[in-house]
Amino acid sequence: MHGPDERYAVRGDEVAAKSFDGEVVVVHLGTCTYYSASGSGADAWTWIEEGRKLGDVAAAIAERYDIDADRARRDLTPFVARLLEEGLIAPANGDGPLVSSSPSASPSPSIAADTDYSPPELHAYRDMADLLALDPPLPELDRPAWRVAGDDEQG
Amino acid sequence: MRVLFVTDLFWPLIGGIEVWAARVVTGLAARGHDVRVVASRGDGLPEKDTLQGVEIDRLPFRDAIEERRLDRFGEALAELRRIKREFSPDVIHLGTLGWSTMFHLLSRDASPAPWVLTLTQQRLASQNVAGDTVLGRALDSADWVSSVSRAVLDQAIELSPGVAGRSSVDYWGMPAPPEARPVSCDPPRLLCVGRLVPAKGFDLAIEALLALTSRHPEITLSFAGDGPERERLETMAYANGLDSIAFEGWIRPDRVCSRMAEATVVVLPSHQEGLPVVAIEAAWSGRPVVASDVSGMAEVVSHGETGLLVPAGDGDALARAIDEIVSDRELARRMGVAGRRHATERFSLESMMSAYECLYERLVSGVERSSAGQ
């Protein structure tokens, strides 16, 4: 595992992320790749984003999902490696005070409690730009609309 | 049956997919099905709307992806999940491969209903279908892939061989317009219909007109449509002194066939087409078609019978083919009649709706689900 005292920061120049309803969506603005994670993956992202040490993140996952701490650490390692590979996070410089954290820190309020554990996973969707180029709906074109009598009752 | 139709492109915007999607949902509703539409928001259209009693929700798929608006992303995903849970569809039909596909894939936990993906794209062959792509996931997990043409489906199967066992070609159909009067070649009137974009190759039609003017001094060419190529095409026409060319702008989809009935030949010099809706409309209008032989074109235009196909990008061949038809009134009329017959056999609204109904029934009854991806 990456060192338990290591902290990472989201690469804010190239990455945007948002958590909602127990899920996180991340977009790499440079590659137009979208990522999603839910459950423990969304928790891990949120806690990493908050600047917690990896050891604390693993401990928090263990506590939330009531699993063995070693298992949480083992599962977190490939997830963090993937985030690094995808260029979504980078090592944080050690001197910055990020946030105080502890293994028993309360979960972020945006993350819904979920006790069904599965290892954190990152799902990528790499081809949105390619798909849009296949048959673009011409956003640059001021397309006309047509409605005829009886078609609609506009709400 | 409860059908949730999810699409990026939809009425009241003009376009082949938009018009087809509107025909499908209103056709299903007319056959007694409970239909609901989720479409992409934009173009100033209302978030909630109805089309002949069919409820439409427009969600911010486009803003979420094109503008990288993650707040919109969360809103669209949450709304799609809510609609799936509330509506509890028996089947979900994705009308387009695009923004909404990713949202559907991300919200599959909200509905166990089998789902159909309609493929329209004509350049699938170059796409990446790795497991971490929207296309790869969609082709792997769709319970059924419905393609608008054999040419498009062949590309999908080449990319993802598993699609072969759970797919069909379902040609788009349209309501039969009134029988048009016989084709007139005096004077010869050429018509191009569609978005004025480079892929349509409309500059070749102007070149063809230029080549034919000395032989047919009364010949005219009209463009019904609009788009970013219009200025270039207008400049090209005026630079050549061609005052026999008219730019009519968009015409309403429900008036396309009556406009075509005024033409001698409908010209489609496209560089690519999935399923050329304009060629279907020309056939229904009883008008011969001269078109480039690309992708699904030969599935609509029967060479020598309902029109003539020429190599894509070959302006000389296009001019010769047009000349052959406008110089022979009997040939033009025969092709027009054959086109109408071909359309009746292959592109009727009734046959399209029956095909979708039958497909939904098979999916819901489980006949076709066992072979689908997870």
Image (tube, rainbow, N blue to C red):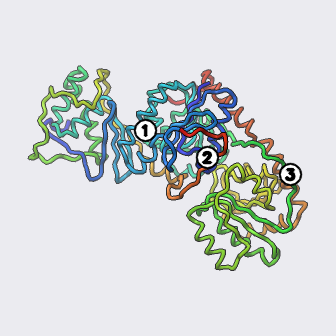
Residues packed near mark 1 inside 10 Å, few (<14), some (14 to 19) or many (20 plus): many
Q: Which residue is mark 3?
A: B337
Residues packed near mark 3 inside 10 Å, few (<14), some (14 to 19) or many (20 plus): many
Is B227 placed above or below B77 here?
Answer: below
Q: CA distance from mark 1 to mark 2?
A: 21 Å
Let me know if marks 1 and 3 both belong to one chain.
yes
Residue drawn at (55%, 52%) of the image: A135
Q: Are marks 1 and 3 in contact (CB under 8 Å)?
A: no
Left or right: residue B227 versus residue B31 is left
Left or right: residue B124 versus residue B280 is left
Left or right: residue B109 versus residue B245 is left
Chain containing mark 1: B
Q: Residue most toward the right?
A: B330
Is B129 placed above or below A77 here?
Answer: below
Whether residue A106 can be seen here? yes
Amino acid type, mark 1: Ala
Residue B133's tag is none
Reading the chain from its start, which is encountered first: label 3 or label 2? 2
Residue drawn at (77%, 74%) of the image: B212
Amino acid type, mark 3: Val
Residue drawn at (57%, 52%) of the image: B123
Q: CA distance from mark 3 to mark 2?
A: 27 Å
Q: Nearer the viewer, residue B118 or B45?
A: B45
* Secondary structure category for the residue under label 2: helix
Where is residue B143, by image quadrant? top right
Q: Which residue is mark 1?
A: B76
* Secondary structure category for the residue under label 1: helix
Q: Which residue is mark 2?
A: B17
